Amino acid sequence: MITENSERRVISVIVVNEASVLSRITDLFSGRGYNITSLTVAPIPESRYSRLTIVTSGSVRVIEQITKQLHKLIPVLRVYEHADLVEKEMALIKFPLSENLSDISTLCAAYNGKIVNVGENVIIAMVADEPVRIENFLRVIKKYNPKEIVRSGAVALER
Amino acid sequence: MQISGAQMVIEALIAEGVDTIFGYPGGAIMNVYDEIYKQNKFHHILNRHEQASVHAAEGYAKASGKVGVALITSGPGFTNAVTGLADAYMDSIPLVVISGQVPMSLIGTDAFQEIDAVGISRSCTKHNYLVTDAKDLPRVLKEAFYIAASGRPGPVHVDIPKDVTAQIEEFNYDIEINLETYKPNVKGNTRQIKKAMEAIAKARRPLFYLGGGIINSNAAYEVRELVHKTGIPAVETFMARGTLSYDDDLLISMLGMHGSYAANMAMSETDLVIGLGARFDDRVTGKLSEFAKNAGVIHVDIDPASISKLVNADFPIVGDIKNVVLEMLGLSDLIDADKYKTWRSNIKNFDELHPLTFHEDSDRLKPQWVIQRVGELLGDSANISTDVGQHQMWAAQFYPFTRPRQWISSGGLGTMGFGFPAAIGVKAATPEKISINFTGDGSILMNCQELMTAVEQKLPVINIILNNNFLGMVRQWQTLFYDKRHSETDLSVQPDFVKLSEAFGGIGYRVHTKEEFDAALKDAVEKNVVAFIEVLVERFENVMPMVPSGGSLFNMMLLEKKEKK
């Protein structure tokens, strides 16, 4: 019962869009020793709510506690912790212009992306895909000497 | 009506039916204090430290069942109050704590007496607010009282910048609370309750595990009825003392680290734990994997997050204890009380084997005797507050509690310095009862300035200082687990407690013998003034029995048996 496997979970939290609500969420995680792998937040259009997507990991018991503790916060409306969801993440990658641009462009296309900006010495490429595929993409493009990588963190929607 | 933010605070407190508040003025809260000066609808008690104000509000809330209110200033006023907030949060005590803040224009500038108060209180309150516009004040204050008292109760902190208390706006308190995101579930699931009752009917050795939630829910008398109807024995947590009367045949005693042998053995042997408003705290369960190992678990709690947090519940029921127990009572015909006869007698045997007791084998008084004696002399007529340490455990073990809200102690946070100010709040809430604070020579010094408050307000708290010239509980652990290295726990150098009390206008007694103790207590009760009764007790007495930290409940260190002379 104590040694349960830790697994990756995506939790969506709908919160009232008010001051310090994000601190309440992150304080809860740090105060109780839970992990945050990534966290995204944005207002839900035409409502007074925001939606957070938190990627976390923990045993079944820990995940259950996380959802219950989140729900206990006063400005939290709903907590979704579903296994069945559509998940996407975006990454921006800066490459030197001297790299093989057609290779990069083809790879990006395979991951729902493209070259979005071209500068004097660098290009910026964008990809948007499932987080595991983003991982994979970032591994593959290592040989093209990426100078900078920015990941957005996952967003998810229950099916 | 158009009034200032400060006036709104006063009007809201009056509308909430508040009759007593505790506090300490200062720069950022002066507008509110100015309005307190002008009103006569409620009484303000000036403590001599903000921590004490919050503890007094806790004591008031615990004894009365109402929301306790404390009023403090910004910066150090607030940070002093944090321990009280944390204490109330851990023990689910309904409080509204209002603090002043520097004016809005100065927030974030490291202004004089500025601190990010809501940033600090976030992790030790049920909820908190920084009010940035007086228009929001009526709603915020109304929500604060509602949130503090409903669901699982807890402290709510409201931080109000000075310019907001000066701002003049329309005040209307006759508003509906509409919190779409906060709707505590108070009614237990009927099907689940039925299933739980069927499981109880099937069980052979069921055990009620009664927690502090019962007191919060004002359900003690319903729980008593349920226990008696079903004939199922019960153990109480530290927080639940007084749920059953001490002389109830079905009450085994307190369980946990310093629980009785019988209570801990019953918990180890039961086949069905019926948890009511208890949270399976580490001081109760000992080693989790060995806790009630062969038992199913029914867990009734208003806080879903308490259920299956530490011990998996087979029958989780989210709801207010009172509602759920009333529904259980309706189904109590399912249960045959005679069925548990053997189980009850087994527990009796445990109790006879290792009863909760102590030996009178030293020249100095035994601290347990003092607790017992106060019980004999005052019993039901006293409310019992405590500080934290050995005296607290002895009080929980040996005082004959007869009713809920008689027992006021810092359980979850274990805050030394809690007892005296809490007992002041208790006396303010229940003036008809004698307010006793059992304390130690360590704890009492952590809020002894409250002598001034108690004397000034004529709140005659009787502090019984069990003086062993040690920080006793830590000394006990050092003796048992640190090879008797008594690091920084020897409190041989002490103030003259009698003179200390007298210096503030109280009375003091130094007691060596039983006769002296009886005379001192009688005199203090008769004189009805603030008192310190310093009792010189055996220095090396340990709280027994004891489950060593992380050990199993059934593996207790027991009181040494002595031959009867």
Image: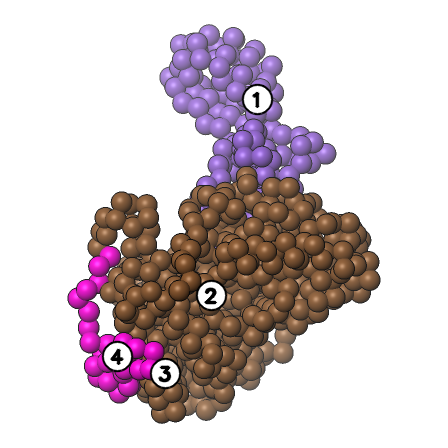
Chain colours: A purple, B brown
Where does the image place residue A145, in percent across and percent down from the top left?
40, 13
Question: Same subunit under labels 1 and 4?
Answer: no
The span shown in magenta is B489-516
**Chain where mark 4 sits:** B
- Mark 4, secondary structure of its residue: strand
Depth check, front residue: B171 or A116: B171
Label 1, on which residue?
A: A132
**Chain where mark 1 sits:** A
Whether residue B396 is visible: yes
Label 2, on which residue?
A: B396
Label 3, on which residue?
A: B518
Q: Bin the neighbour count of mark 3 within 10 Å (Cα to Cα): few under 14, some 14-19, many 20 and up.
A: some
Cα distance, mark 3 to mark 2? Answer: 21 Å
Q: Amino acid at mark 3?
A: Asp
Label 4, on which residue?
A: B510
* Residue depicted at 64% across the width and 41% down the height: B294
For the residues carrying marks 3 and 2, which lies nearer the camera in this image? 3
Where does the image place residue B77, in percent across and percent down from the top left?
32, 69
**If the image is split into quadrants, where does the N terminus of chain A sit?**
top right
Question: Same subunit under labels 2 and 4?
Answer: yes
**Chain where mark 3 sits:** B
State the count of labels. 4
The quadrant holding residue B236 is bottom right
**If the image is split into quadrants, where does the C terminus of chain A sit?**
top right
* Residue depicted at 47% across the width and 71% down the height: B399
Cα distance, mark 1 to mark 4? Answer: 73 Å
Depth check, front residue: B34 or B367: B367
